[in-house]
Amino acid sequence: MRSRKKRLNENRERQRRLKQVINSSSLSHTMAAIGTCCSTLPARSNLRTSWLSIRTVPHRRTYPGKQVLQRKFGIRAEINFVNVEEAKKLTADDGYVIVDVRDKSQFDRAHIKSCYHVPLFIQNEDNDLGTIIKRTVHNNFSGLFFGLPFTKPNPEFVQSVKAQFSPQTKLLLVCQEGLRSAAAADKLEKAGFENIACITSGLQSVKPGTFESVGSGELQDAGKAGLVQIQGKISAVLGTVLICAYLFITLFPDQAEKLLQMVPSS
């Protein structure tokens, strides 16, 4: 008899706690503190990102003096990270449109033919004192040695993409190293675009001839500029000369000795 009474009391306690959870206003207080009614939880698997969307909305039923909330779950768009071969297949077979998000200087050096150019960063020509100092330091180091332009985020990036494509358009975003395209994909995914793909390592991993390109150089070399590139060419020439000299001395020692004897002594 006591055990039965004990089980009844336990069931009543569970029901009471369940009612407290349902009727508790802590959810609405928490959502008000956060200041949002929608949250997303990312899940990554096999270089693919999907999103579980959780929305808190008023319940259809209303009770006097109480606000009843319910949660709705749904799967949002995903960002597909692919390699070069997979990217080419997406454009050739699946109808993906290529959007190049690099800055103008890299785009002009080399870009995929028939792609769209919507830069994630644009040239920073602001003339406030802080920007002038930063631009001077940048141009004397990164700009001089690596040929990198002084840029700032493009405030019209998302709007520019929206003006050219619908949210259902399949977009393949490309940049030089893969970082800017990932950042651009995140912005567009939040703006409602549903089919987005990025090349994991960027155009620097694209071998010549993979895509039909336009420009003075190859896609994989479009990020190279400045004194580092010139120094690299000089080093390559000097290395070639030294290797040829070493082979000549090794294979033709007599002729090499005669040439050395012809050199006037100081």
Image: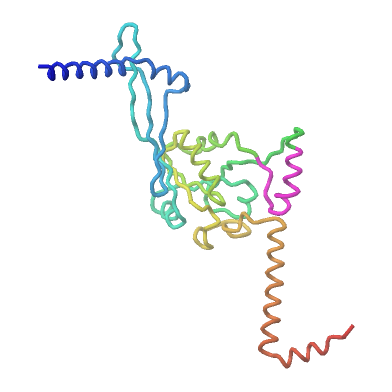
Extreme-bottom residue of the structure: 254
Q: Residue at x 41, y 46 (%)?
A: 48
In the picture, the quarter occupied by the C terminus is bottom right
Extreme-left residue of the structure: 1
Return the x and y of residue 233 as percentages of the image width and height. 69, 65
The dominant secondary structure in magenta is: helix
- Tell me if 263 is positioned left or right of 70 in this view: right
Q: Nearer the viewer, residue 78 or 25?
A: 25
- Tell me if 243 is positioned left or right of 178 in this view: right
Q: Nearer the viewer, residue 204 or 157?
A: 204
Q: Residue at x 71, y 54 (%)?
A: 145
Q: Residue at x 70, y 86 (%)?
A: 249
* Rendered position, 70 above or below 146: above
In the picture, the quarter occupied by the N terminus is top left
- Tell me if 72 is positioned left or right of 84 in this view: left
Extreme-top residue of the structure: 64
- Tell me if 224 is positioned left or right of 21 in this view: right
**Which portion, as a residue range, is magenta?**
132-151
Return the x and y of residue 194 as percentages of the image width and height. 41, 38
* Rendered position, 29 above or below 94: above
Return the x and y of residue 238 as percentages of the image width and height. 71, 72
Query: Quadrant of the rendered structure where residue 135 is?
Result: top right
Q: Is residue 144 magenta?
A: yes
Q: Residue at x 65, y 49 (%)?
A: 105
Return the x and y of residue 80 as percentages of the image width and height. 42, 46
Q: Is residue 46 magenta?
A: no
